[in-house]
């Protein structure tokens, strides 16, 4: 318990820090609404031009529900870890953070965990409630919620590990912007955050099935939106996500160990 | 290695591999594929032993290798060769565990939480370092006695003045009662009053907690006020390791008189060289100021000033302690 206390202390501080920036919260909620309005009209146009109510097995309504929830999920999942690491590295503050009595990776994760909590409460939950009320009954309330939460925890871990790997690259490049933009684009596209995977061509979908990204948005949302989910299907998806979380964590640990050694030997 | 020492460096060398950069657009593209590295030796065979409770000042100009040495002692950097023990451990090998027992302040970089009031940062550090409640309370009580706590304790760090922030950073560093504290340029950018406040605080904490303190600075005043023992580093090499009294003969009686003349500076310097020939004054200048290094055992600053004013008009003047660079120059010239 005492071991955990030092991590939760960081979460607590993160929450206080977040709530301190009141305007930022307001802007975030507002920007979110703006983005949702935009995708509403984009997809309305897509469905209108296709001339049928069902495109790739999805109705306009189910597409919208998926995208709204994906956006809400994105808002608390995107923690700008790569930025944070890049800034630490460029400013040299990383030297201070390396000298904290916990691993840098843990320190960073728990430092941002506070904003996870705040964003989950202030954007995901309200969005979810609104979608549920507006679409009455499209989202089933039952065991799928619990599966969803487990899937989100795994998604958070996988997302963090990917960010941490990309952030580690900054140790070599000493620049962040380009790498981060590329990472965001790749993850947003291949995870199903911006376009439901059902709309992808079959060949690309086959490739995506073997990548970790879909575990971040596609898996949790598919589970959330399914009625009476088939236990076998859920178990399989979870297992895949879990395996990716383990693999990505091993890769990021190894990569970090090698890279930080490079820094301490050759200087930074 | 000897147990009675808190820090031991034996023949420590640190080399960095730096890419030889070429000029221009074409050169930049060539650099992308270049394997043309040069080796820069930042620290060159330094040996040093520090006893528990000592305050040791590392003095040297910018780029001398002070910070690199400190970073090796904290474990952020690994020495290229040599043996290094801090608190009986090899610092870079077990960084996380090691950091529990050391404290670090790196210049103007704050380890405090920007948006939080100071007290929240303290509470956080208490949990992160797992400081027992009674020790924490004891430390806070001590801090309350040493500094005017109330005006900063509930202030968010981002609203603090630089002086308050440095003060807070130092308090935060001592909070988990580390055995060794490293202070990298703790008084940089502070005004005279704040400098002396910070010095008093460091001295008092060292006395009360018997903490070993290693500090780097290029301010002679810091060294004079805090350190019994001085290590001077220049270009990676150790130039001097002895007590302060011994060093005083290099800077004690010297003052730098800075003068901004109304006339052409080059002409004035030439004339001054002749006029002050008998007074044992070393003259140098930049675009704006003439610097006169005066040995007060032989001539008083006022006398020099009087002599100058006989012939020249002065726009502005300042009196300063001898600079680190001058001390080093004198050591090179005169030997120890």
Image: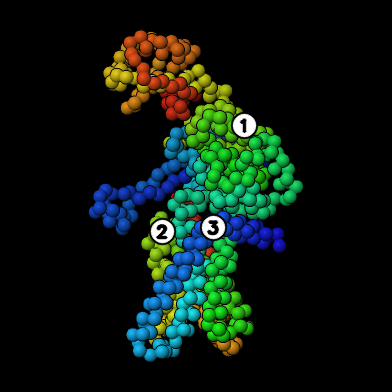
Q: Nearer the viewer, residue A262 or A103?
A: A103
Q: Earlier in the sequence, mark 3 or mark 2?
A: 3
Res A223 seen here: no
Q: Helix, strand, or loop for circle 1?
A: helix
Which residue in the protein does label 3 denote?
Answer: A22
Image quadrant where residue B306 sits: top left
Horizontal side of B151 relative to A55 (left or right) equals right
Q: Position of residue B242 (x, y in %)?
A: 56, 28
Residue B34 rendering spot, x and y as whole percentages: 31, 55
Please say if the residues under marks 3 and 2 sit with CB atoms less than 8 Å apart: no
Crowding at mark 3 (Cα within 10 Å: few <14, some 14-19, many 20+): few
- Name the residue at 26% across, 48% down: B23
The disc placed on residue A176 is 2
Q: Name the chain under label 1.
A: B
| Vertical order, B242 against A216 (above or below) | above
Q: Are marks 3 and 1 on the same chain?
A: no
Figure check: A67 above or below A15: below
Q: Residues within 10 Å of mark 2 (few under 14, many from 20)?
A: many
CB-based contact (under 8 Å), mark 3 and mark 1: no
Name the residue that disc number 1 marks: B200
């Amino acid at each position: 318990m005492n071991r955990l206390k030092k991590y939760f202390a960081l979460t607590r501080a993160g929450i206080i820090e977040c709530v301190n920036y009141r305007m930022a919260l307001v802007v975030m909620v507002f920007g979110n609404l703006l983005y949702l309005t935009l995708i509403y009209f984009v997809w309305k146009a897509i469905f209108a031009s296709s001339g049928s109510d069902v495109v790739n097995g999805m109705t306009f309504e189910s597409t919208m529900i998926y995208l709204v929830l994906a956006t809400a999920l994105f808002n608390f999942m995107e923690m700008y870890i790569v930025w944070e690491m890049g800034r630490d590295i460029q400013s040299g503050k990383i030297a201070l953070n390396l000298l904290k009595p916990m691993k840098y990776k843990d320190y960073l994760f728990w430092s941002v965990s506070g904003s996870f909590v705040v964003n989950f409460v202030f954007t995901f939950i309200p969005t979810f409630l609104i979608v549920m009320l507006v679409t009455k009954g499209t989202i089933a309330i039952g065991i799928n919620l619990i599966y969803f939460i487990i899937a989100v925890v795994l998604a958070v871990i996988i997302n963090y590990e990917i960010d941490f790997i990309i952030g580690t690259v900054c140790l070599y490049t000493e620049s962040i912007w380009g790498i981060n933009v590329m990472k965001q684009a790749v993850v947003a596209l291949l995870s199903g955050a911006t376009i439901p995977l059902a709309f992808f061509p079959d060949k690309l979908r086959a490739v995506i099935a073997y990548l970790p990204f879909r575990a971040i948005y596609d898996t949790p949302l598919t589970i959330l939106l399914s009625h009476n989910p088939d236990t076998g299907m859920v178990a399989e998806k979870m297992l895949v996500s879990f395996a990716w979380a383990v693999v990505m964590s091993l890769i990021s640990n190894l990569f970090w160990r090698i890279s930080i050694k490079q820094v301490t030997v050759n200087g930074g | 290695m000897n147990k009675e020492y808190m820090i031991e460096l034996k023949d420590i060398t640190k080399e960095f591999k730096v890419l030889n950069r070429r000029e221009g657009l074409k050169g930049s593209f060539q650099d992308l594929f270049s394997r043309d590295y040069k080796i820069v030796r930042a620290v060159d065979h330094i040996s040093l032993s520090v006893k528990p409770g000592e305050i040791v000042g590392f003095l040297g100009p910018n780029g001398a290798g002070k910070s690199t040495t400190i970073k090796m002692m904290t474990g952020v950097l690994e020495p290229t060769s040599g043996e290094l023990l801090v608190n009986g451990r090899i610092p870079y090998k077990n960084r996380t565990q090691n950091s529990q027992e050391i404290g670090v302040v790196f210049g103007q970089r704050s380890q405090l939480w920007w948006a939080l009031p100071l007290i929240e940062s303290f509470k956080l550090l208490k949990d992160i370092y797992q400081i027992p409640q009674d020790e924490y309370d004891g430390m806070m009580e001590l801090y309350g006695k040493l500094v005017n706590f109330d005006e900063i304790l509930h202030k968010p760090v981002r609203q603090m003045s630089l002086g308050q922030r440095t003060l807070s950073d130092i308090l935060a560093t001592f909070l988990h009662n580390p055995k060794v504290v490293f202070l990298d340029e703790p008084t940089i950018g502070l005004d005279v009053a704040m400098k002396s406040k910070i010095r008093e605080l460091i001295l008092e904490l060292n006395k009360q907690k018997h903490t070993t303190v290693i500090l780097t600075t290029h301010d002679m005043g810091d060294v004079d006020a805090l350190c019994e023992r001085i290590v001077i580093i220049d270009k990676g090499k150790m130039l001097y390791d002895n007590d302060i009294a011994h060093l005083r003969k290099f800077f004690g009686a010297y003052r730098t008189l800075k003068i901004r003349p109304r006339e052409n500076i080059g002409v004035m310097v030439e004339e001054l060289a002749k006029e002050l020939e008998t007074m044992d004054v070393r003259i140098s200048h930049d675009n704006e100021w003439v610097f006169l290094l005066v040995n007060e055992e032989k001539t008083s600053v006022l006398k020099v000033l009087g002599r100058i004013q006989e012939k020249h008009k002065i726009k502005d003047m300042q009196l300063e302690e001898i600079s680190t660079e001058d001390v080093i120059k004198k050591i090179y010239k005169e030997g120890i």
